Image (cartoon, rainbow, N blue to C red):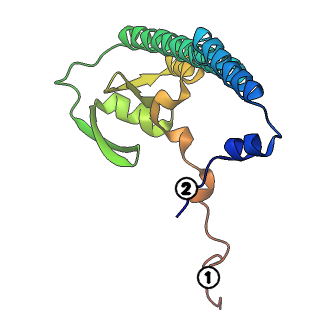
Amino acid sequence: MTEVGSLQDELRKSGLVSEKSRRDQKDRRRKGKRKGAKRGGRGDPGSDLAAAYAAREQAEAAERMRKKEEEARRRKINARLAELIKRVQRVPDDSADVARYFEHHGRIRKLYVSAEQQQQLNAGEAAIVHVRGRYHVVAGGILEEIARLKPEAIAWHLGDADPSDDAPDEDFGEPSQGPTA
């Protein structure tokens, strides 16, 4: 069998391509490779890649800065909430003998309160607040301040209940009184 040569060899044998043009073409290839090596191995597409990396780095830096500012804001609010809770008159543990059950984050929680606090909670004048992993009973202006700063810190408040839950269902109607005689 005969060995098949390259297209270049065939073109040179037919006289369409000279030996000199073949050498010029090899030289151009070598120069192109050297230029690419000087640019760090990247040509025009490399500049697009560098721009993409720079844009990505900028976006990541902006995201890190946003998260840092959000964390600082959250810490400032939590410190303010802790300061407000310190100002609340704390009831000594021995007078807090009434167990108050409430739901928070889908779980039933238990907090011991005094009889006075129990009355305030039932009247809607006080609320249970969750700050730094603990539950506290707060009332009045402090409750309003906490609601303004961080509404999700209020774990339970009588005003949170939907008043339509207590209304009778329209599907069942009002109970009839029966015939009157």
- Image coords of residue 173 (percent x, y): 66, 77
Residue positioned most to the right: 16
Instruction: Tell me: 112 left or right of 130.
Output: left
Q: Distance between the residues labelled 2 and 1?
A: 110 Å
Q: Nearer the viewer, residue 2 or 155?
A: 2
Three-letter amino acid code of the residue under disc 2: Glu
Residue positioned most to the left: 94
Q: Which mark is residue 46?
A: none
Q: Which of 31 and 140 is in front in this view?
A: 31
- Image coords of residue 32 (percent x, y): 67, 18
Image quarter of residue 165: bottom right
Under circle 1, the secondary element is loop
Asked whether the viewer can see residue 129, the reply is yes
- Image coords of residue 110 (percent x, y): 28, 40
Three-letter amino acid code of the residue under disc 1: Gln
Write the residue at 68% across / 43% down. Answer: 9
Write the residue at 61% across / 88% down. Answer: 178
Residue count near mark 2 (Cα–Cα under 10 Å), binned few <14, some 14–19, many ≥20:
few
Quadrant placement of the C terminus: bottom right
Instruction: Tell me: 84 left or right of 47.
Output: left
Residue count near mark 1 (Cα–Cα under 10 Å), binned few <14, some 14–19, many ≥20:
few
Q: Which of marks 2 and 1 is nearer the N terminus?
A: 2
Labels in figure, total: 2
Image quarter of residue 16: top right
Image quarter of residue 83: top left
Where does label 2 land, which residue? 3
Q: In the rendered structure, are the residues bearing label 2 and label 1 in contact, judged by CB atoms less than 8 Å apart?
A: no
Under circle 2, the secondary element is loop
Instruction: Tell me: 24 left or right of 35.
Output: right
Where does label 1 land, which residue? 177
